[in-house]
Amino acid sequence: MRITGVRTFHVLPRWLFVAVDTDAGITGWGEPIVEGQARVVERMVHDLAEYLVGQDPRRIEHHWQVMYRGAFYRGGPVICSAISGIDQALWDITGKHFDAPVHELLGGRVRDRIRMYGHGRGEEDADFAAAALRAQAAGMTAIKFGLDGPIRGVETPEFVERQVARVTAVREAVGTAFDIALDFHGRTSPAMAKRLAEKLDHLDPMFIEEPCLPENVDAIVDVARSTTIPIATGERVFTKWGFRELLDRRAVAIIQPDLSHAGGISEVRRIAAMAEAQYISVAPHNPLGPISLAACLQVDAGIPNFLIQEHPALEDRSDLGEGILETPFTIERGSIAVPQGPGLGIAVDEKLLAERSYAGDWLTPRFTHSDGSHGDW
């Protein structure tokens, strides 16, 4: 079996899909994307395709090594995201070839269902409480929402009180049998993260995500040592080498590698094994589409230190595959059954993809502080 071509698709609302075709009539699908830089990653995918065409797609590890190590410069979001989507597609092809789900090729499942959480959105505290109540009524057991932004290096007591009031409203609405995760989104300085964590501790958040940017591990360690709330990070970290110091320093309780950024199924499986040795849980990051989710579920099924799986919970359910997959994913009682179909366990309807096509020009939102300076989104 040989790879005959690599095709890419820009898909609303901001996704990039890749299809890897073979002379055996098997097509594998992946989701290579850097949000806000889809067209740049698309170019990288096609650069890598020059090597891949003519190769046996089942030599997944060999191709991963060549794609990552074959150029002088390694790593970074663009290269790693392109590799990630291609890696997903190669596993999809290989699973379809052997008529087995990817998780069986990785050693088999250790669980039958994958616990899920979605995003809560709104403007007022009541909006977030209502979103959590809707999720709870639908059988979900957790939700995640973010802080207001932008956030200055040191904020006012009023700002802190406003964030605490929002979490309080949600906690009072759903009770203590429902988990609330908080995404600081790297907007906060370590000093503000510590102040907020102190004020939020009594509300028992499931975790605080990205209390500060992961570029400085010492800063994350400083925040983590100051609170009993579990700290999570990882969406902006790439490959096992990027995660090594976070894990060796036990800087976080939860890592969140993104299967469309960190190196695909192959690399995230290795990262999870490294985390297992440090008793650190894995909650894969996924604010993306149904192919990324499908890849996540295959890894989630087989790692013992899996905690919970993110999805953006879009109103049209497209993130679960509605209008994209022949059979969308279904969440029941807050979880998705481990997929049993071959490969990633999905079938993409290319006619439906055409209806969601766009130019790939989604841009990352930009915040501005009151003094005109840039604020992190």
Image (cartoon, grey):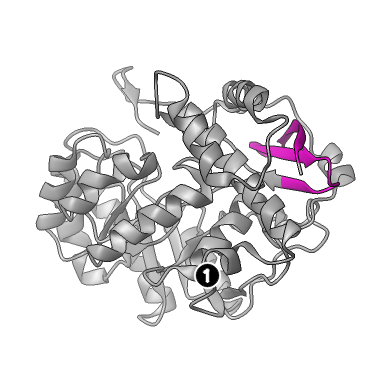
Q: Determine which residue is flagged by label 1.
A: 301
Identify the residue at horizontal 66%, vertical 70% (top origin).
339
* Quadrant assignment for the N terminus: top right
| Residue 289 in sight in this render | no
Which segment did they paint magenta? 2-28
Q: Position of residue 10 (x, y in %)?
A: 72, 32
Percent across and percent down for residue 54 are 73, 31
Number of numbered callouts drawn: 1
Amino acid type at circle 1 is Ala
> What is the residue that sits farthest to the right in this orientation?
351
Relative side of 9 to 81, left or right: right
- Residue 371 belongs to the span the image colors magenta: no
**332 left or right of 7 in image:** left
Q: Is residue 70 above or below residue 175?
A: above
Q: Quadrant of the C terminus?
A: top left
Q: Quadrant of residue 100?
A: bottom right
- Mark 1 Cα-neighbour bin, 10 Å: few <14, some 14–19, many ≥20: many
